[in-house]
Image (cartoon, helix red, strand yellow):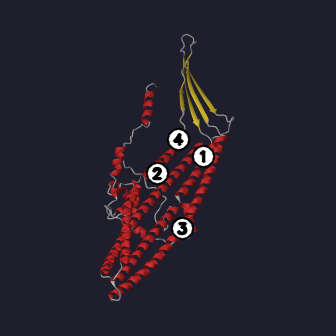
Amino acid sequence: MQRWIPLVFVGFLVGCAHYQSQPLLPARTAEGLEARSLSDAGLQTFLETNAPELVKEWPRASWDLPSLIFVAFYYHPDMAVARAKLAGAEAAIITAGARPNPTARFLPTYDADAPGGLSPWTLGFTLDVPIETAGKRGYRIAQARYLANSARLNGAGTAWQVRSRVRSSLLDVRAADLNQELLTKQEAVQNQTVGILEDRLKAGQSSLFEVQLVRVAAAQTALQLRDAQKRSAQARVHMANALGVPVNAVSNIPLSFPAFERLPAPKDTGALRRAALLNRSDVLGSLAEYDASQSALQLEIAKQYPDIHLGPGYAWDQGENKYSLGVSLTLPVLNRNQGPIAEAEAHRRQAAAAFTALQARVIGQVDAAFAGYRDARRKLDTANELLAAQQKRMQSMQESFDAGASDRLELLQTRLELEAGELARANALVEAQQALGLLEDAMQRPVDGAGNSNSLPPPIDRKSN
């Protein structure tokens, strides 16, 4: 018997978890952040696992919205935080399902008045075996599972927020580059106009006032061009932040923008509202929290019923073997767990009120975003009509110029009006895309149904980073 006791003790030690220190070194963490790039082998493996269609060629010839979204899923710190919270919530399920361990007691007793020739020692052992009643363990597990589901849905909401920031920053890059391109063309036309008017001024065919007006307009366009160049650089910085990488990782990468060529036709706001109310991750997460509050209330009600403790024992007394069996429980005479039950009921009412309030906010967000998107599309339609009219006028003026019926100044002025119309149309298109992004954020899914927002990318093991 004595030989087995050390073995049992060693077995307990072997089965125990051991602490391993994992210190955070700010310098090493900073180096890992600065070393992130879009050519990382770990990123390639992540894309091959989760979006193989995005790595049919590697390195990619250009980066578009879907590929950049997965880059953010891989790198952005918010995703790591969401995964860590989900891991903690799933670990809580194990904690909730753990059964209480029995307690062993060794009770040696020394009899100072023992008669001569008899051992004064009595050796006794007892066990305390707790038995939970009224389904408490099941309620704990249910509550933990609901909270884990809520954490998973909150992680999906984080994933959508990351996606939304990537889309918004990429759209800013597209808008700045497009403005820069159109303003460059407009500046070139204005400079040609200034040159013609200056020649006419020298010939006495134009006034200084006319020349100065065109010069001021050209200077304003030049300032707008510089501002567009500044916005383009800032947009790249914001895109890097949205991806979770340093700016040098995206400063020179080629970008493509097919995602911004689509503008789905507005649907019935009622259908969009219902889709948001039934599918938004925060709505589903709030519903899971309400279910968890229900399980918490069931658990507190079950705690009215005391657990049973079995106490089997053994004693060796003067060569005699004595066995005992004890049963104990807490008598619910002074309280019946009324306070915790009342708290759990209040928490359930609070969770229900929070769920209703969230649905009300979602309705308001969808209605406002839908109205904004509808109006932005109407503005774009108007800009398209005006641009079409200006293109026809430009074609007519070109034909007139080719026939010698109009001069180059008239041609340049017409072209300048066309360039202004193209710029207005480009700005209206960007506004419509921004409004579409707000509508998709209100629904937490693409308006045309493409993609799936209610999913959290899998955990990533990036020890090197």
Q: Which mark is residue 296?
A: 1
Q: In what element is the residue under mark 4?
A: loop
Q: Position of residue 163 (x, y in %)?
A: 44, 59
Q: In what element is the residue under mark 1?
A: helix
Instruction: Establish if 415 lies above or below 221.
Output: below
Measured in 3D between alpha carbons, the distance from the residue under mark 3 to the one under mark 4, in whole angstroms, is 49 Å
Which residue is under mark 2?
82
Which residue is under mark 3?
370
Q: Position of residue 43 (x, y in %)?
A: 35, 56
Badge 3 or badge 1: first in the primary sequence = 1
Measured in 3D between alpha carbons, the distance from the residue under mark 3 to the one under mark 1, in whole angstroms, is 39 Å
Mark 2 Cα shell of 10 Å, populated few (<14), some (14-19), many (≥20): many
- Asked where in the image residue 239 lies, by quadrant, the reply is bottom left
Measured in 3D between alpha carbons, the distance from the residue under mark 2 to the one under mark 4, in whole angstroms, is 25 Å
Which residue is under mark 4?
98
Measured in 3D between alpha carbons, the distance from the residue under mark 2 to the one under mark 3, in whole angstroms, is 29 Å
Q: Is residue 435 visible?
A: yes
Image side of residue 139 versus residue 28, left or right: right
Q: Tell me the residue at 32%/64% (across/down).
A: 61
Judged from this view, the residue extending furthest toward the top is 116
